[in-house]
Amino acid sequence: MSSLYGRKKRQPENKNDWFVQQDPVKSSIEPVITWIGHATFLIQVAGINILTDPIFGDASVFFPRIFAPGIPLAHMPPIDVVILSHNHRDHCDMSSLYGLKKVNPKMTILVPQGDKKWLEKKGLASVVEHEWWQSYEHQTAQGLCSFTFLPAHHWSAQGIFDRNKSLWGSWMISAHDHHIYFAGDSAYSGHYHHIADQFPLIHTALMPIAPEEPHPWMRKSHMDAPQAVQAFVDLKAHQFVPMHWGTFPFGLDTFKGPLDRLQSAWNLHELGTSKKLTVLKIGERLII
């Protein structure tokens, strides 16, 4: 009974309340952000289609998807750039990368230092690796987009013998005077102040808010919702979009618990008039 209850409490009361089915736009000059689920977003700006930490299947047999991807892999528009925050399997899914590369052979994959050689051995080409604060530029006829790899407080491993053999981090996507911050996975730390010093005009921050429970263990490598709000304040960003919640039954959180704590922390900081909290449904599109 306890196991059954544990599964039920991680499910929404009505899945239709949290899922939007719509076809993606082919491309966009101005920023368009669509939440696919977990830490996977389709970000479209400057005529460039970007995918973050793609995973379109289950995280494992123990962690099946609660929702289907907001855009199925087969319905994705052409992808130009994939960015990976680190190589954990729920952020660096080989099946998804193979599927994307098959239909996007010229796709560039931006990765942390230490992942390039491993991915090339897996048969993936056009992999560019980065240390913190290094940047990559992608030019199209519609404009220029810059990707800067930034710090995070986390760890890495694909298997049991490669723990912390590669770097982990976050990304800033900059185009047309818009700066979109993708936080990846991270515990709360002082690096958000340093990022704000280098990028004083962050419009949208895509921030992880779960898993939270069991809190003493999770907080070593993940932020809870109140810490994510504090990180957002440190970043001095304008708009908060939560991610890394509700897609897989990680931790011991209830489905809506992270969102409730997020709203409470937001109200506590009195950010309602000066900042914007945008909670996307899976598959929902945000036009900036």
Image: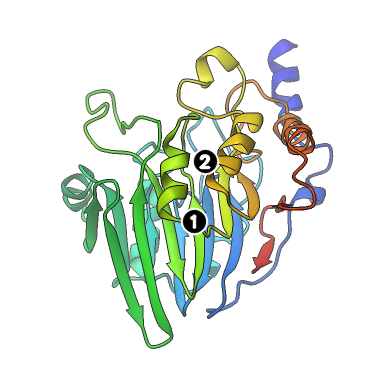
Relative vertical location of residue 6 with respect to residue 224 in this rendering, above or below: above
Which residue is the site of mark 2?
58
Query: Residue type at mark 2?
Result: Asp
Residue name at image x 22 percent, y 24 percent: 161
Residue 89, position as x, y percentages in the image: 40, 38
Q: Secondary structure at mark 2?
A: loop
Residue 10, position as x, y percentages in the image: 71, 29
Residue name at image x 51 percent, y 59 percent: 180
Residue name at image x 21 percent, y 61 percent: 125
Picture quadrant where residue 148 is located: bottom left
On-image quarter of the N terminus: top right
Of residues 54 and 61, the one nearer the viewer is: 54
Picture quadrant where residue 261 is located: top right
Q: Is residue 220 left or right of residue 213?
A: left
Q: Is residue 160 left or right of residue 63?
A: left
Query: Residue type at mark 1?
Result: Pro
Among numbered discs 2 and 1, the one appearing first in the sequence = 2
Which residue is the site of mark 1?
200
Relative vertical location of residue 72 with respect to residue 218 in this rendering, above or below: below
Residue 95, position as x, y percentages in the image: 38, 50
Q: What mark, if any, has residue 9 been given in the picture?
A: none
User: Which colour style is shown?
Assistant: rainbow
Relative vertical location of residue 229 with respect to residue 196 in this rendering, above or below: above
